[in-house]
Amino acid sequence: MAEPTVSKSAELRTRILSALVLAPVALGLTWLGGWPFAAMLAVAAIAMAFELSALLPGDTKTSRIMLAGFALIAVLAAAAGGPLVALLAGLSGLTFAITVGILRNAPLWPSIFAYPYVILPLIGLLWLRLDPEFGRVAIFWLLIVVWATDTFAYFFGRAIGGPKLAPRLSPNKTWAGLIGGMFGAGLVGAIAAIWLNLGSPAILVLVSAALAVIAQAGDILESALKRRAGVKDSGKLIPGHGGILDRVDGLVTAAVAAAVIALLHGSVSPGAGVLIWP
């Protein structure tokens, strides 16, 4: 019985060491913004494209390269200050992939799902970060909301247990964990609103809690993809953690939602659109 304990201990050490190396790099590039931040997302775009393609039916070397290539083009366009051009690049890639699928008589839904899944969150993150006044704060708020959601959901779920949230898709998720994640995210929203001393803390708390639900949905969605593909992790890129999709599954959906909120709010800047409320 001792061997599994050693194995789990070694895995935990690997996870911690990976986080200690990667987290400061990711946070530092996020702090810098601009092209360093874009470069990080460009690498993420390629990794996400390859991992997601492997989880979907009809995966080929060509489909992986196509998705990665158009995702990279979209990131570069968004970084240059052209989110509309970036969206057009993503739409062009999706159109091209659908055309290829029709010609090959292949299923179309993997392309229809994959291109928005990979490209939209990257464009959303870059668009928010480009805000010269609130971009840095908005991205760090979003990251901490997602991390708080995962952390509080884990501890609430372990401590309370109870009914499962989506047992067929993600058997470890519980309703108690979801409520805990919403509480943690709402706490982050309250702290951010008080720290900024702008707008309504109550509304930012609600927005943060809503993003927690969306982040958990992203986590469950990625779990469903892995279960369908019959794999435990999306990849082996990060020692002890699996693939990049395993680390950003909640951020993928939360980033898109945050960008949509900023767009619909119609504020003077995207960062203010998600952070500052009347």
Image (spheres, grey):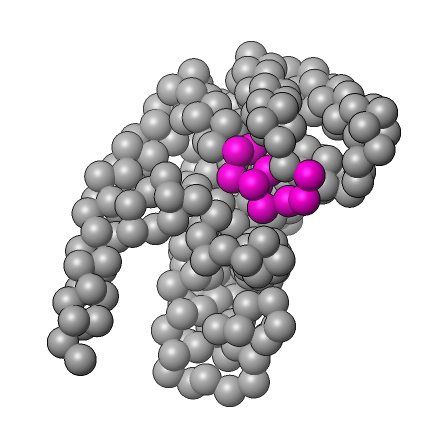
Q: Is residue 253 above or below residue 106?
A: below
Residue 55 on the magenta segment: yes
Residue found 72% across the figure and 41% down from its top:
110
Is 57 on the left or on the right of 20, as rendered? right
Is 182 on the left or on the right of 115, as rendered? left
Is 104 on the left or on the right of 277, as rendered? right
Q: Is residue 150 above or below residue 71?
A: below
Q: Is residue 195 among the parts visible in the rendering? A: no
Residue 110 on the magenta segment: no
Q: Quadrant of the rendered structure where residue 269 is?
A: top right
Q: Give the residues in magenta.
A: 49-58
Residue found 34% across the figure and 51% down from its top:
241
Query: Can you give x and y, in whole percent of width and height, for residue 73 in the image?
Result: 60, 16
Residue found 19% across the figure and 47% down from its top:
17
Residue placed farthest to the top in the image? 80
Viewer-side residue, 206 vs 23: 23
Viewer-side residue, 219 vs 192: 219
Residue found 48% across the figure and 73% down from its top:
172
Query: Can you give x and y, in whole percent of width and height, for residue 72 in the image?
Result: 55, 20
Quarter of the figure that contains the N terminus: bottom left
Q: Quadrant of the rendered structure where residue 66 is?
A: top right
Query: Can you give x and y, in whole percent of width and height, for residue 174 in the image?
Result: 52, 77
Most common secondary structure along the magenta stretch: helix
Is 84 on the left or on the right of 236, as rendered? right
Q: Is residue 256 above or below residue 219?
A: above
